[in-house]
Each structure stands twice: as structure tokens, then as C-alpha cells.
Image: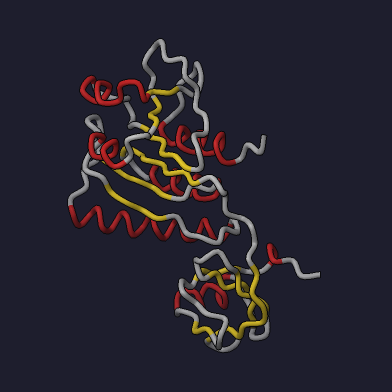
Amino acid sequence: MLNLRALPRVFIPEASADGPIEIPKDELNKLRKVLRLSPGAEIAILPNDGTLIQCRLEATHATPIAVFAPQTEPEFKLTLAQALPKGDKMDEIVRACTEIGVSHFLIFPSDRTVVKWDEKKTLDRVARLQAIAREAAEVCFRTHIPTFEVAANLKDVLKRNPNAVVLSEVEGIHSGLQKQGNSMTIVVGPEGGWSKPELKLIGERGVTLGPRVLRVDHAGPASAALLLLNRA
């Protein structure tokens, strides 16, 4: 019996099962040198369209055998808007949230963001985060790679997503995080919390995860898990 979950997987966007699939050099090196696969081994090509192409590995290409549509993507579409954290915490947030099932990441600097990204650094960092998300999606057997977007600030985030909910540490918030419709955006702040002007922007959008304060690199994954992994 074929076990699709056991097949080594690589994303090759827009790959087609109509003929041999050329494997990019980096992916071929991963299959050959990291996974130690030989010609004739069966692999899975993910075209990033919700399907999986079962293939036979050849010298520099893959020969399609069959096409499947595994149901591994959440029906509920979640966007995580994350204020820039320090260090490599964004890497871990993207990796964990991709594995949990987040569909889209919206990254932005907040008033208390410590790190500063200029235009070049933004392009480089987003490219790195896209690579992390791609690898995480392969590992956890997703069929779509999460997408990325950059916003100027919290005001810009809320303008793009007027129905977003925002995690807040303000005393007196009693509204917990709950699903809304078929999709939603949840906003997570930086270390140090929201500034007073940002809290004014947040208004009634504030929600809480409970009485304890989570680290910035735990808040996003915890929120995603509550919304995407609960089958009840």
C-alpha cells in the first residue's frame, strides 16, 4: 500500500505531470546528497497547487507516476501579522506556524520594535523566511507554501485587515481568541508590548490568550494552534 507521507518531498511550483519534471539543482543536491536517494527512488513533487505528483527519480529529472490531492491544508485560512522581534525569533515563528498551518504572514515594525530593516535587508530577510517556510511545508506535508507580505506599521496592518484581532496584555480584556468565519487575521506585537498610540489604534480589537504573558516567539504559534489544530 502506497504511503504518500513517507515519500521524500520537494516543492517545484507549477510542475506538471504531463511529462518529465526537471529538478532544480539545489533540490537535486538535497535528494542525492542529503537524503542519499538513487535513481529509481520514488519521490513526491509538490507543484504548490494542492496536488502531489508521485514520481520516479532519474538522473536530473523526475518521471511522473500518479497525481494525488492529499487533504493536508486547513480549510480555515489564517494570516499571522507579526511585529518584528529581535534576533532569529522570526525564523522560529515562521517555521512553527507553517507546520501548524498558517496560510499567510504579514510582517511589520511596531513602535517598540528594536530591529530596523532597510529596503535591502527587508528583501533579504523575507527571502530567507520564504525559504524557511518552504522547507517547513515540505517536512510537515503541506501542499501550499505560505505567502509573505510586509506592512509599514500597525496602522497599515489594520487598514489592510479591518477585521483583524490583536493579542493584547491590557488588564481587563475578557475576550478570548475564537475563530471568525472561514478566515481571519491575528496580530501579535513585539517584545515590550504595544505603545499607547498603538493601543488606541487597537481599540476593541484586543483579545487575550489567558492570564499569563507568552513570549513573542510563542504567542503566534500558540494562537495558530488554538485556531487550526482544534477539531472540535
Position of residue 125 in the picture relative to residue 29 (left or right) = left
Q: Considering the image in quadrants, where does the N terminus appear?
A: bottom right
Q: Residue at x 28, y 49 (%)?
A: 150
Q: Is residue 67 above or below residue 99?
A: below
Q: Is 209 placed above or below 179 here?
A: above
Question: Could you tell me residue 113's position as x and y percent?
Answer: 25, 34
- For residue 231, side relative to residue 28 (left or right): right
Residue at horizontal 56 percent and vertical 89 percent from the top = 59
Quadrant in which the C terminus is drawn: top right
Quadrant hosting residue 121: bottom left
Query: By what rule are the colours in the image chosen?
Result: secondary structure
Q: Position of residue 108 (x, y in %)?
A: 28, 42
Residue 17, position as x, y percentages in the image: 57, 81
Of 25 and 154, nearer the camera is: 154
Residue at image position (41%, 35%) is 186
Of residues 123 and 114, the one nearer the viewer is 123
Q: Residue at x 55, y 64 (%)?
A: 50
Res 166 → quadrant? top left
Considering every residue shown, the one lying at the far left of the view is 118
Residue 149 x, y percent position in the rendering: 32, 51
- Asked whether, in this view, residue 152 is left or right of residue 126, the answer is left
